[in-house]
Image (cartoon, coloured by chain):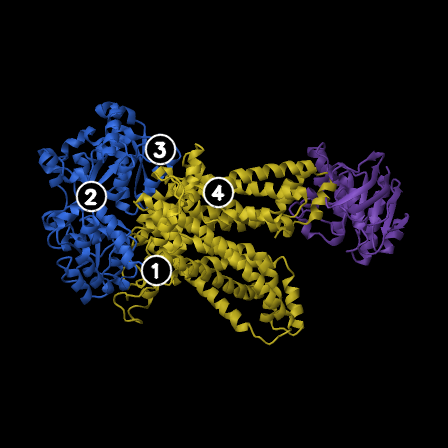
Amino acid sequence: MTLELQSLCVAPNGGKPLFNPVTLSVPAGGVVTLMGPSGVGKSTLLDAVGGHLMPAFHTSGRVILNGRDVTHLPPEARRIGVLFQDALLFPHLSVGGNLAFGLTPQRKGKARRQAVEDALAQAGLEGFADRDPATLSGGQRARAALMRTLLAEPEALLLDEPFSKLDTELRSEIRGFVFDHLRARGIPALMVTHDPGDADAAGGPVIAL
Amino acid sequence: MRIALATALAVSLASPALADWQSTLDAAKGQTVYWNAWGGDARTNAFIEWVGQETDRLYGVKVQQVKLSDTAEAVNRVIAEKAAGKDGGGSVDLIWINGANFLSMKEQGLLHGPFVAGLPNAQYLDLSPGAAASVDFTVPVEGYESPWRLARFVFAYDSARVSVPPASMADFAAWTAAHPGRMTHPAVTNFMGATFLKQALIELAPDAAALQAPVTDAAFGVQTAPLWDWYDALRPNLWRGGETFPENESIQFQLLNDGEVDIAMAFDPAAPAALIEQGLLPETARVFVPEGGTIGNISFVAIPYNAANAAGAEVVANFLLDPATQAHQQDISVLGSFAVLDPAKLGPAEQAAFNALPEAAALPTLDALGPTLLEPHASWMTRLTEEWARRYTR
Amino acid sequence: MRHDGRALRGVVLAVVLAGLLAPIAAGLAVTARAAFGHLPAIGASGFSATPWAMLSDLPGFGTSLRLTLVTGLGATILSLLIAGGAVAVLYGRWGASSGRMLTPILAAPHAALAIGLAFLLAPSGWIARLLSPWATGWDRPPDLATVNDRGGFALILGLLVKEVPFLILVMLAALSQIPARAQLAAGRSLGYGPGVVWLKVILPQVYPLVRLPVYVVLAYALSVVDVALILGPSNPPTLAVAVTRWFTAPDTALMLPASAGALLIGLVVAGTIALWWVAERVAMRLGRRWLAAGGRGMSTGPGLRLAFAAWAGLMALALLAVIALALWSVAQRWSFPGALPESWSLRFWMDARWVGVAGTTLWLGLLSTGLSVILAIAWLEAETRGAKARAKWAEGLIVLPLLVPQIAFVQGLTVAFLTLGLGAGMLAVLWAQVLFVFPYVMIALSDPWRGVDPRALRAAAALGAGPWRRLFMVRLPLLTRPLLTAAAIGFAVSVALYLPTLFLGAGRVPTLTTEAVALSSGSDRRITGVFALLQAFLPFGAYAMALALPALLFRNRRGMA
């Protein structure tokens, strides 16, 4: 699996581009880190890759995922997962309900429940399926959010300052947890961060915008 | 008037159903009659509901009361339907109507009929020209509305607070001067308020007979001059200085019950007795009428020209004239409204039902009410209310 | 995806234009034509200015117009002052959630409260009864005009009782959109007193957010019929009541000046709003200089406390009015000066006649609210998919039915519906109700809708959820509480609607409100009490559900509190 950006550039309608065109390629299991000062358009670039851009902007260039041009697909059809700095678990669903949300409807009944249980076990959250997400600790929430994203079987992942709200100790633990899973599944990831520690831990190339 | 007669003739020729009561009954079976009637009186509402149960049982005709806060609402609805070209299947089947609203609908050809003579129970009515049931505010009924209850204008007072009520309309000025703020009348925009003025006009006018003819500017000036002198003397001593008035007679009865005023008025001699029974007036409330008698008229029901259930409406109108219905209605525990039938036309069996009715202390006898005075021509009321508004609405 | 949004937007706009605006326009057109002498149904045709001449010649016309302006503007200005002051105290003590305390009053329809207030304030009313004869020496009521007074004070009071809590509620909602607490703290650290910060920092931010509700209050106060009928002066009454009287007068020729009067009320509302708008600009100009002058000395504490006291007084009156209605509904006889009824009876409650009427009211309320909520969701979702901010014209479109006086178009609307072959009855009433319910639902739902964290929806999209799944599985569940609140508001509006229900139902669709108002023209306060109380109780039940249901559904979801 690879994620490629070809001369990708974002501009407000009728305005100047936010940054110089970006061309890069993320190999399976690799992480490319984007860094740069606030307001340079890092998050906007991620939005463009994920398909979440507001209509007030327009994109030039192409986003290629496993040889498939997804530039003009709606976000739900791209198979690109996102992790934000908040876990953004849906507060109206249980922890298990959150994980099942991303699961394909083809998996039904027992198999579905089993997949959720397995994912919870991998995240050290056995027996948490019926819990209220609001009662989880920060680390538990972050792990549950990753599992929810992985259950949707993404072909690439976007990380939008995913660790910035965690305290230092937890940060390295969750980082390791996320990058291990990405590597194990061979998912290419694109990360935006302010923290050089994140880039070091990711180990991949760093691009300054 | 000629136009009204012509349309009357045309409609009667076009309605063979009137000739044959049985076919009316057949057509009416299964219909629901929407009876548009003022809904401010719980007892009348209950009576109308009883009527519906009876007509359903006897003829398979249901009655649904459309409760109005003003009869003109129903008139407007028919006008709106005519404006929209809806000349059949109209939403109003039967209207409790009187005077100005009747005149207005009749003049504009908004009424179905003539139908009254075709009702079997019309045999108990005195329909000779000039009889009470043939004239509504001096407007000839001509079969376009059917009578159902007798209305007589009366005053009510609380005998515990007032020992001697005014003896005549002229006496009201002196009485209010002695008891400032203890008397009022319903707003003149309301039928009852206008009737209070008419009652005074009949007593005070130099020539009361002139009131039976349509009003002219000259006659109005001459006949009403004493009325305004009297009213100018009366008004400052009315409740709240005569600057505001209760919306209708029901509100005024509420004021009597609350003790805010000592006198109220009604178009129903049984009203005070009925209100006592419901706990809405003190036990000591009594009826009085000024010497010389009071205005009387009959409440009618009419059928709009586009009524969806005209046959059913006729069946209901006929049922209302049944001697048994009229006796039930006169029962003080039901409505206490006097019958509209001609006693001379009732047989002994029909008479007996009336003789068996209970009595009440606050219910006056027919004799105690004195003579019935005729309503002035409807045009007088319009002029009277306009002139009143011009003089006293600032 | 964009195409999907465009199609949805087109459908919603078509429904709103054809279903909501065309009827109003048609109704206004009928009224306007009649105002210029064209009403074939009563044999008037051709165009002339005669109805306007007739109107200005009608006795008391000038007084009516003056009364309308005085009571309408007076009630609006006073409610704005009281609400603006009281909200400062409420927010300071209980925060934004203090709005929940207001729901019982908001739930009670105007007519029910007015009927209760009329009894409370009358010279023979409950307050006088509680104080007589021991304190006042009255063994019979004094001849004082405490209701239906010529100055219209009782009417203004009756309007304040409903409009002040309404404005407080919208102000609290607006406050939740700005960082009010932090700004208050910042202002005070600069040496400004709390009242001054409120006036100089918070209110200037809140006002633009509540401007539209203020206009709605203004339009309502200038054109209200039922409250003015019950509490206002009667000879002459306000213009709206006078017009209603002329519309319903036996002399049908009066329909022409009545139409002119109805149109005039529309013009008065438009003119007053325009004037108000100008006054806003002027105040802003002058205010900016005052804000920048840096003065910290003016103490506004006493003013705020006075406003809060006025608010507390109004709420006490409303509460007493409702209690008085409840007492009357179980009284047999209750005469002056008894503080309580002397005999009691449950017969008006046992008499089951109210059950069917309450059922009709309930169904109408549920259906009109359901339709309005669906339409509102469709509108908002279309906006979301278009990802556009709402245009000013669309905002105006939504509230138009609340700004155009009902009296100016309901009679015309009836004719328009009949012309379409849509007879009077349930369907016509339902349609007319949606006209008024939809704007309130939209107003209540718009801000919470936009307040949903867009990242939650992006997360859902990234998990493969398409637009419909995002709407039904994420956005709507997250909006459960505001959705139910909007529905409760819509339901309360439906229950309280008087003129549209009366006219379009041809009187055949009796609701608690039409019955209560009809009964209030009679002499029996006891049965009026039953209907008015029920009329207040139904919406109250809806509000209670809106509070209780989410608490029950999400009892294990702290994040949904």
- Chain name for mark 3: B
The colour applied to the residues of chain A in this rendering is purple
| Chain under disc 1 | C
x%, y% of residue C555? 59, 49
How many marks the image carries: the answer is: 4
Judging by the rendered image, the residue that carries numbered circle 1 is C148
> In the figure, is residue C483 to the left or right of A6?
left
Left-right relation of C274 to C242: right
Q: Is residue C174 left or right of residue B40?
A: right
User: Which label belongs to residue B90?
Assistant: 3
Vertical placement of residue C73 versus C522, above or below: below
Read off the chain for label 2.
Answer: B
Locate residue C149 relative to residue C303 in the image: left or right: left
Locate residue B233, reporting x and y percent.
Answer: 20, 63
The answer to whether tags 1 and 4 share a subunit is yes
The percent position of residue C24, horizontal first and vertical second, equals 48, 42
